[in-house]
Image (spheres, grey):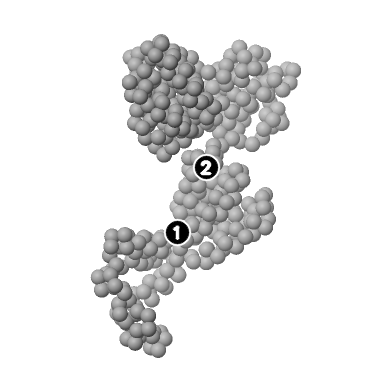
Amino acid sequence: MEPLAYKLKPTKLGEVVGQEHLVGKDKIIYNMIKNKQVFSMILYGKPGIGKTSIANAIAGETDMKCRNLNAVINNKKDLEIVIEEARMYGGILLIMDEIHRMNKDKQDLLLPHLESGLITIIGLTTSNPYHKINPAIRSRCHIFELHELNDEDIKKGIKRAIKSEYLEGIKINKTTIDHLIGLAGGDLRYAYNLLEVCYFSNATHEVTIDTIKEINSKPVFFHDHDEDGHYDVLSAFQKSIRGSDVNAALHYLARLIMAGDLDSIYRRMAVIAYEDIGLANPGMGPKVDACINTCEMLGLPEARIPLATVVIELALSPKTNTAVSAIDRALDDIQKGNTGNVPNHIKTNSKDYKYPHNYKGGYVPQQYLPDKIKDHIYYIPKETSKYESALKNIYDKIKNNS
């Protein structure tokens, strides 16, 4: 049995939900179809937002023969058959799902036919093609990013499904539609699938909020572990803490918890404690470490409590990046060859070394950096916290006594 999402697949651009920046009047794909000239392209974006829909609509509005393959499922032999068909018909439109997973053998087979124009490809992927797709394939394709669908887009799609012949006699009110939109999380395919299951779950074909909750009460969000969406959430998590937005930090923490990805949370919190908080609040490093140990002992769902506690403190803590900036300046010097010899008086067993503890205040002026870079400055303190302000006072006194 074909699912509702498949039955509702567009056959022309006017049936595509959303993506007006590509398929709207006088936009690029709209004009390609209008001018009867389709070029190889890669469509990328989150699941359920219209990649396959646009590809099917393009295929439906052209006179070209069309074939669908999946880079994971279909093998080299399948691709060879498509190439032979292309020679027979004088060209073919190939829709390639999961194009970022196409192996080298398939790429080598396909490339000359993309080059000659015998095959026009529409590649579909949830991954960023600039990171995941072979440059040789990428350079022969135009790359179009699809935008997330908003609530109005999802509502438009749901209403289209309700009016279709496939859900005859469906009963659903506005409140239930709004609830379904909220659960979809911008994924129209998911909305179609959930609507269809609810429709067939009772004899009266009445879809209510209670019906939906019996089937699935959790909202959908895009979290493709080890792919772009996963790293986008982690990036947003760290940037929200760095920006001191505690509510956004908790939101992204909740998404990571829902995905069960404790290891990524731990690693990101640990780096935040030193990269973004650093010397402004040096006690955060040990606190994060203690939090991780507690979470490992508790496990989920209880681990959410210490995680939330520490994330709130990270977000609201004073911030400084002086430590990471300092080490990066030092590393940059090394990479540029700015080193020099260790001064003789601080080499091993040197008799000229002045032992600071033998002097008043535990400090004595002497040169530690090599002659070549003796005046280089790496640490530039900030005064965003009492702790680093105190360090700055000590630092300034030492510099003034040198």
**Residue shown at the point (47%, 47%) measured from the top left:** 235
Instruction: Choose between 200 and 36: the one closer to the eye.
Output: 36
Q: Residues within 10 Å of mark 1 (few under 14, many from 20)?
A: some
Instruction: Estimate the x, y position of residue 296 in percent, counting from the top left.
Output: 64, 56
Helix, strand or loop at mark 2: loop
Which image quarter is the N terminus in?
top right
Residue found at the far left of this picture: 372
Residue found at the far right of this picture: 203
Residue 177 visible in the current orientation: no
Cα–Cα gap, marks 2 and 1? 23 Å
**Residue shown at the point (45%, 70%) measured from the top left:** 387
Task: Quickly name the residue at label 2.
Answer: 226
Helix, strand or loop at mark 1: helix
Q: Say above or below: 155 vs 363.
A: above
Q: Residues within 10 Å of mark 2 (few under 14, many from 20)?
A: few
Task: Quickly name the residue at label 1.
Answer: 275
Instruction: Estimate the x, y position of residue 311 in percent, counting from the top left.
Output: 55, 55
Please state which amino acid type lies under the numbered disc 2. Answer: Asp
Q: Say above or below: 34 vs 184.
A: above
Q: Say above or below: 389 vs 75.
A: below
Instruction: Point out the frontmost of discs 2 and 1.
Output: 2
Please state which amino acid type lies under the numbered disc 1. Answer: Glu
Is 250 left, or right, of 18 in this rendering?
A: right
**Residue shown at the point (47%, 18%) measured from the top left:** 81
Instruction: Estimate the x, y position of residue 255 in percent, counting from the top left.
Output: 57, 44
Numbered mark located on residue 109 in the image: none
